[in-house]
Amino acid sequence: MSTPEQRETRADGAEQLRTTKRSRTAARMAEAASGGWVAVLVKIASLAVIDALAVYSILVLVRADNWVVAGIIAVVTAAINWIYFRRGGLPAKYLAPGVVFLLIFQIFVVLYSGFVAFTNYGTGHNSTKEDAIHALVLQNQQRVPDTASYPISIVEKDGELFLLATGPGGVALLGGENQPLQIVGNATFDGGIATEVPGYTTLTLRQQLQRQSEISQLAVPMDASESGQMLRTQDGVTAYVYKALYVYDADTDEMVNTTTGVRYADVGTGAFTAPDGRELLPGWQVLVGFDNFARAFGEESIRDPLISVTLWTFTFALLSVVGCFVLGLFLAIVFNDPRMKSKKYYRLVMILPYAFPGFLSALVWGGMMNQEFGFINTVLFGGAEIPWLTDEWLARFSVILVNLWLGFPYMFLVTTGALQSIPSELTEAAQVDGATPFQAFRMIKFPLLLVSVAPLLISSFAFNFNNFNLIYMLTRGGPRDVTAGMNVGATDILISMVYKVAFVGSTADYGLASAFSILIFVLVGTISIIAFRQTKSLEELH
Amino acid sequence: MTVIQPPISAADVLTKPKEEKVIEPRRPFGKWFRQTGWRHIVGLIMLVFAGFPILYIISASLRPGGTLVTANELFSQVSLGAYVELFNRPQQPYAAWLTNSLVIGLASSAGTVLLAALSAYAFSRMRFKGRRVGLITLLLVQMFPQLLAMVAIFLLMSAIGDIFPAIGLNSQLGLILVYLGGAMGVNTYLMYGFFNTVPSSIDEAAKLDGAGHARIFFTIILRLVAPILAVVALLSFIASMSEFVLASVILVDPEKQTLAVGLYQFISQETSRNWSVFAAGAVIAAIIPVALFLALQRFIVGGLTAGSVK
C-alpha cells in the first residue's frame, strides 16, 4: 500500500509506520513490483476499451445533436481516467465501477421518476411538439377532390423509397419523402406506365408486400411550394393527391383545420386545443406540475382505488410477514429437539418452496386454485366450484396462503439459526430458578430472538410490500374492481397498480404511474426509518 | 403415526463398544409421543404442504397432451412427451427463453459479485472521507428496489435505444446493465458484513510480504470470503432468473425474452389447455435454481443472517 493518506487512515490499532520519505518510496516500489505487469496491462486495456466506447458514443450523440448527454459522458470518462491513472485515491478505484451503475440505473432513474411524475408523459403525449405537428400533418390527410390519379411504380435507392409516377400526358415523375416530384426524362415505360428509372431499383411485388407499412406511410410532396399537397398510395399501383387536414400556422402557433377553419391553439396542456376544448392528438410532453398528484388524490375514480390498494398493500405485507414468521418459528421450535430423528429429511423438503423460483410457484398455485379444473376444487373439495382467485375476499386469502407457502421456509431457516445461537445456559438458569419451559421461552429466548431477527422481519416486510411477482402471476391483481376508473383489482398492491397503469392495456399513463411510484417511495422510506429506529431501541433494551 | 423410532436391538447394544455413545433407555410410547412423536406429525403435515405443489407439477409434466383437468390424476401416466413438445413450439421458443435466462442470469450475477465485492472491500478495509455517508446511503438505497422506478427505466432505455440500439430497449445487454445497477445497493451491505469478519491482520501480513492492494484483494481476500461470494452469486442469479417486471418491459421480441416473461405469457395465452407443456417448462426452469440452492444451502443460511444482523 503506497500513499500516506491511506496509511494514516488505516487506524485499526495497528502500529503506524513512520511516514518518512524513504519508507514512502520503498512502499511505492513494493507496490509497483507486487502488482506485476499483467495487472498494469489489464488496467490499461480496460481503460482503453472504455475510452474507445466513450469516444464512439460522444461522436454518435454529437451527430444526433444531443450535446447534454455527450457532455455528461465526456465528464464521466475523464473522471474514470483520472481515478485510475492518478496515484493514490485507492478507495475510489474500488468504488467507481459500482457507483457508475448505481448512479445511472438506481439513483438517476429515481430522480427521473420524480420528473416524469410532473409531466403528462403517456399515450398521446410521447414526444416533442415538432414531432406532434409532423404526426398531425401526416396522419390526417384527405384526398383532394377532382384531381387525377397517378399510376405508379415503387423504386428504391439506398434503402429509401421513392414513387415513380406517370402524370397526365405520360410524363414520368419521381419523388420521395424529402424530395418533391420532378419530371425525369430517361424513365423506361411499359404499357404507358413508367416502370424503371436509371439509378433506382424497382421493387418486386414481394418486396412491396414486405414493406407495405412503409409504402403506405410514404407521402411525396407534389411540388416544392407550401401547398401541402402530397402524392400517396395505398396499394402500390395507383397514387392519389392528398392534402393535409391540418396546417401548422407558425406565426400564431396554431394548427388550422383546412376544411372547417377551426383554429387549435397551444394552451400549455401538451396538445393543440380548439376554443371549445377539443384536443388534437397526438400531443406532446409538457410539465403539468402537480396535476398527476391532484388526480391521484382528487379524482374519486382514482382516489378510492388508490386508498383501498394502499390499505391492502399494508395488510398483505403485514399478514405475510407475521404468518411466515409464526409458522417458521413454530417449526423451528418443533424441529429444534435433539432427540428427534430424521430431521434433515423434513428440513430438505420444507426448504423446497424457498428454492423453487417464486414466479413459477405462483403460476403453479394459480393452476391448482383454478375454479373449474384446479386440483384443490376438483379433488380436495370433491368438485365444489370455490372461487379461490375470482372472489374478492377469497382471492386475498389465497394470495396470503400462497405467500405463506413461499415464505415460511425462509423464516424457518432464519429462526432456527437464531434459536441455536442463543446459549442454552440462559434457559437452563431460568429453569433452575423455577421457570416453566414456556416461561423460559416467552421471557428469555423470544426477546433475544426478536432482537436478532427484527431487521430480517423489516426487510421481509419491505420485500412483500413490493412483491409484484406473486400478485401478478397468481391473480394479476384481480378480480377487477369494476367501479374504479382504471384497471385495478382487489388483490392489486401499489407496485402492480403502477405496472398496470404504465404498461398494461391500450393506453399508458407514465405520468400518473410515476406519481404512484413516488408515493411508494415516500411510504417505503417512512416505514424503513421508523422500523430501524424501533430495532435500534430494541437492541438498546437488551 | 407412521414414523416409529428404529428399534435398538439387544445385539446392537451388546456388540457395539459402549464408550461410543450413551444410548438412552427407550421411552415408553406415550412419553415418547409427548416428547418427540408429535413433532413427526407436524413434520408430516409440513411435508405434504411444502412438497405437494412440486409433486403435482412434476406429475403434470409427465402426462403428454395433458390439460389442467387431467393433471388432477397424479402420476396416472409417465412419459416425457410434453418435454419433447416443449422444445418444438415455434410460437413459444422455450429453448431460447432458457438460454436467455441462463445467459442473463450468469452475466448479471458475475457482474454483481464483482461490483459488490470491490465496493465491500473498499468499505471494509479502507478509511476515507465519505465512508460513513456512503454506507448509510447504501443502506437506504437497498430499501428501494429498482422495480419502483420501472417507468423511468423503461423511458430511459427507450431513449438510449434511439441512439444506441445495442444497449437500449429490446436488448439483453441493456437488461444486464440495468440489473447491474441494482447490484451494488442490494449486495454490498451483505458482503460488507462478511468482509469485516475476515481479520485484517491477514492483509497486514500480506502487505509486509510485499503484496499490493490488488494482489491482496484478488488472491487473498476473495478466497477467504468465498462463501459470501457464492451466496451473492446464487441470490442474484435466482433473482434475475425470476425477475419479471423489467424483463417484460425491456425485452419485446419473443426470442429475446426470459423464462419468467415467456412462461407467464404462455399461461395467459393457453390458460389450461397445454398445462402439461407448461408443467414441463416449469420443471426444467426450476431444476437449476433448486439444485444450486440445495447444494449451497449451508452457505446461504449463514449468509442470510450474517449480513443483515450486523
Image: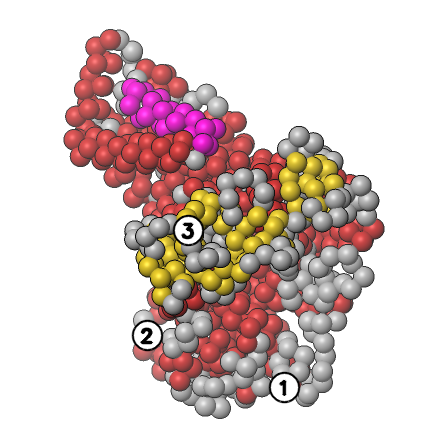
| Residue that badge 2 annotates | B16
Counting the numbered discs, the total is 3
Magenta span of residues: A65-89
Q: Quadrant of residue B114?
A: top left
Identity of the residue drawn at 41% across and 51% down: A174
Name the residue furthest top.
A21
The alpha-carbon separation of the residues under discs 3 and 1 comes to: 72 Å
Near-viewer residue (A480 or A325): A480
The alpha-carbon separation of the residues under discs 1 and 2 comes to: 50 Å
Q: Judging from the image, what secondary structure is the residue with disc 3 in?
A: strand
Chain under disc 1: A
Q: Say which mark, if any, is on residue A379.
A: 1
Locate residue A166, reporting x and y percent: 44, 58
Near-viewer residue (A365 or A166): A166
A5 left or right of A288 in image:
left
| Residue that badge 3 annotates | A174
The local crowd at label 1, few if under 14, some if 14 to 19, many if 20 or more residues have their Cα within 10 Å, is: few
Locate residue B23, reporting x and y percent: 43, 71
